[in-house]
Image (cartoon, rainbow, N blue to C red):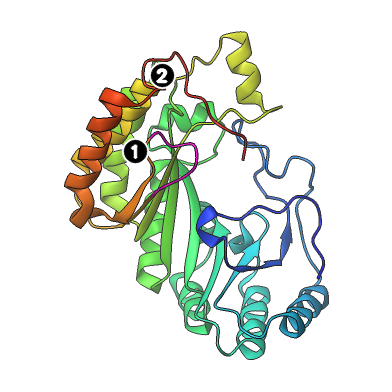
Amino acid sequence: MHYEGKIYRPWIESESLLIQTTIGCTHNTCTFCDMFREKKFRKRKLEDVFKDIEEARTLYSYVHSIFLTDGNVMVLKTDYLLQVIQKIKETFPELERIALYSSYNDLNRKSVEELTILREAGLTMAYIGLESGDQQTLDFVEKGLDHNEIINGARKAKEAGIRTLASFIFGLGGKYRSEEHIKETTDLLNIIRPEEIAPMALALQPGTTLEQQAKDGEFIQASPLQILEEEKYLIEHMTFDTMYWGDHGNNLTPMKGMFMENKDRFLTYLEHARQYHPEIHKETLRTFAW
């Protein structure tokens, strides 16, 4: 099987077979991200993707789930994606899940009818980087999104029946915009109501623009206490049920489970962390590169 460059997948997809369908990311300017910096976006030739799918069948007698990489695979034309998904389903009849990276703009560019066709063919999940609901924070990190695009993209996915997982970053607003960042993020989540969410604490990635801005004093990191308070605010003010994947390795208190049934337990964990976590009174949170 062929993989070009570093390959990234959500930690939730750790047991999935990875099929590289795109190279890089179409946006690739987010100041906090270094995942695809060395790659120029392009789609792989369909015949090469098919070869990898066929080879994978010879290597694995059973495959439960497949994740399509690299970045925002949903940007590809519907016909191309449909052929990939159909080939996967034909080759792995036992398969239960097919997931990929998307952006809200990718969803916006497709009709509900196109998305429905992809879902009926076998696409089950789209992982989407929300990052923040605060427009000033989104603009600062050059995410290239606004609220209307996010809301409309999320609406289309829901109408088509495609599950979405929205990831976002505690601390992305920095020290001086922490409150606005988490309030606006929570408010937006209550509107778009993704089926799953994956919050993670900010880790400054080596060589990124945001890391340099932190060194230059243009960006002041939120403290561990602020990051904990952001998660507390989120849990106290979310009004819908969702799968909560709060177990990223950089989070202060790794937690996961269905949100409503675990809400009180999550708040208890956060209060315990406030009192006893060794990082809580430090100036910045110790994190690790992706």
Going by the picture, which residue comes out furthest to the top? 217
Q: Is residue 59 magenta?
A: no
Kindly report which numbered mark, 2 or 1, lies closer to the viewer in this rendering. Answer: 2
The quarter of the displayed image where residue 186 is located = top left
Quarter the N terminus occupies: bottom right
Q: Which mark is residue 62?
A: none
Q: Nearer the viewer, residue 60 or 9?
A: 60
Q: How far is the residue under mark 2 from the one under mark 1?
A: 18 Å
Quarter the C terminus occupies: top right
Q: On the picture, is 8 further left or further right than 150?
A: right
**Can you give x and y, in whole percent of width and height, for residue 26 in the image?**
68, 50
Q: Residues within 10 Å of mark 2 (few under 14, many from 20)?
A: many
Residue corresponding to mark 1: 185
Q: Amino acid at mark 2?
A: Ser
Q: Residue at x 67, y 28 (%)?
A: 208
**Can you give x and y, in whole percent of width and height, for residue 140 in the image?**
52, 26
Q: Residue at x 62, y 86 (%)?
A: 92
Q: Secondary structure at mark 1?
A: helix
**Can you give x and y, in whole percent of width and height, for residue 63 in the image?**
60, 79
**Can you give x and y, in whole percent of width and height, for residue 199 in the image?**
41, 43
Q: Nearer the viewer, residue 26 or 10?
A: 10
Residues in magenta, as a range: 246-252
Q: On the picture, is 181 further left or further right than 50?
A: left
Q: Residue at x 62, y 22 (%)?
A: 211
Q: Secondary structure at mark 2?
A: loop
Q: Residue at x 54, y 61 (%)?
A: 13
Residue corresponding to mark 2: 223
Q: Amino acid at mark 1?
A: Thr
